[in-house]
Amino acid sequence: MKMFLILLMTLVLCQILWAQDAVKSDVHLFQTFLRDAPISSSGYGEFGVAYLNYDFLNQTSLGLQGGYPINEKIEIDVGLGFLFMNPDFADNQSGLSDIAVTGRYLIVEDNKNLSAGGYLTLPVGSNDLWGQNRFNFGAFAAIRQPLNEKFVFTGVLGLDFLEIGNDHEAAILINIGTIYAMNEKLHLVGELKFQSRVDYVLLSGGADYSLNEKGRIRGALGFGLDDGAPDFMIMGSYMLFLR
C-alpha cells in the first residue's frame, strides 16, 4: 500500500511538472512575439537584427522587445526598433519605429494556455519611414495546445484597426504555428501568418536554442506568399530572462 501511494504521488507530480512545461512557455514565436498565450515566470528581453526584402525596398532593423509579468495572469509586452530603409523610389532613410505595446490575460492555464488581450502602436516613428508614425490598435486571442511531449500547437487570432490614410480600417490577423522540441535545448518554430486588408501572408521557420537558464539564441527565415509581405526575411536575436 505504501509503495502504491508513493508511485501514485510520483505519477501525479510528473504530470504536474509536465503540464507546467507542456506549452514550452520559454520558447517564443517569431512573427507574433508580442501576441502569444503564455505568461512568463519572469521579465525578459530580446535584442535582434532582421533583414526584409520587398519588391520596392530593403529594410534592416535593430529591435528590442520584451515583457514583464504583472502577476501569474497578466503580462505587458513592449517592442521598438531602429530601421534602415533602402527604397527603390527615394533616398535611403533611417529612424525610430513606432512603439508596440500589448497586454494579455491568461484565461486557461492547465495543460494548455488560452489568453486574450489588446495591442496598440504609439506613433513615435519617423513620418518619413514607410509604415511608421501610425496609431494602430486591436484585440487578440492566443492559444498553445500541447499535442504530445514534443509538439505544441500555437494559434493567434486578432482583429486589428490599421491607420491607412486618414481612416482606420479593420483587418483580421491569423497566425498558426507549431513548436517542436528536438531536445531539451533546441526547439524548432514554424509559423504561417496572414493579415487581411494589407495582403500579408508570410511562412517562417526558426530555431530557438537555450544556452542556459537565462539566455537563448534564436534565428528564423521567412518567405512571403502575398504582395504585402516581404519576399524574404532573415532574423537573429539573443533573449535574456531576468531570473
Image (cartoon, rainbow, N blue to C red):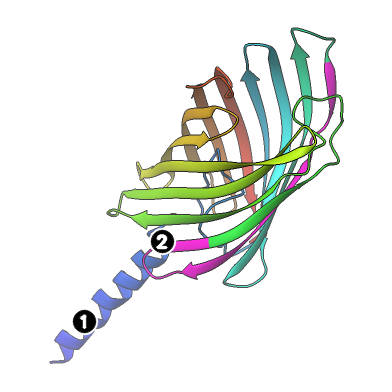
Residues at discs 2 and 1 in contact (Cβ within 8 Å)? no
Which circle's residue, 2 or 1, is located before the other in the chain?
Answer: 1
Residue drawn at x 60%, y 29% is 198
Q: CA distance from mark 2 to mark 1?
A: 20 Å
Q: Is residue 88 magenta?
A: no
Q: Quadrant of residue 98?
A: top right
128 to 118, vertically: above or below = above
Furthest residue in direction top, as rendered: 88
Mark 2 = which residue?
A: 21
Closer-to-camera residue (182/122): 122
User: On the picture, is 80 further left or further right than 29?
Assistant: right
SS at circle 1: helix
Badge 2: residue crowd in 10 Å (few <14, some 14–19, many ≥20): some
For badge 1, the amino acid type reads Leu
**From the image, which quarter does the N terminus lie in?**
bottom left
Question: Which residue is found at the position 55% from the left and 17% from the top?
Answer: 231
For label 2, the SS is helix
Crowdedness near tag 1: few (<14), some (14–19) or many (≥20) residues, C-alpha within 10 Å: few
Tag 1 residue: 8
The range drawn in magenta is 93-115
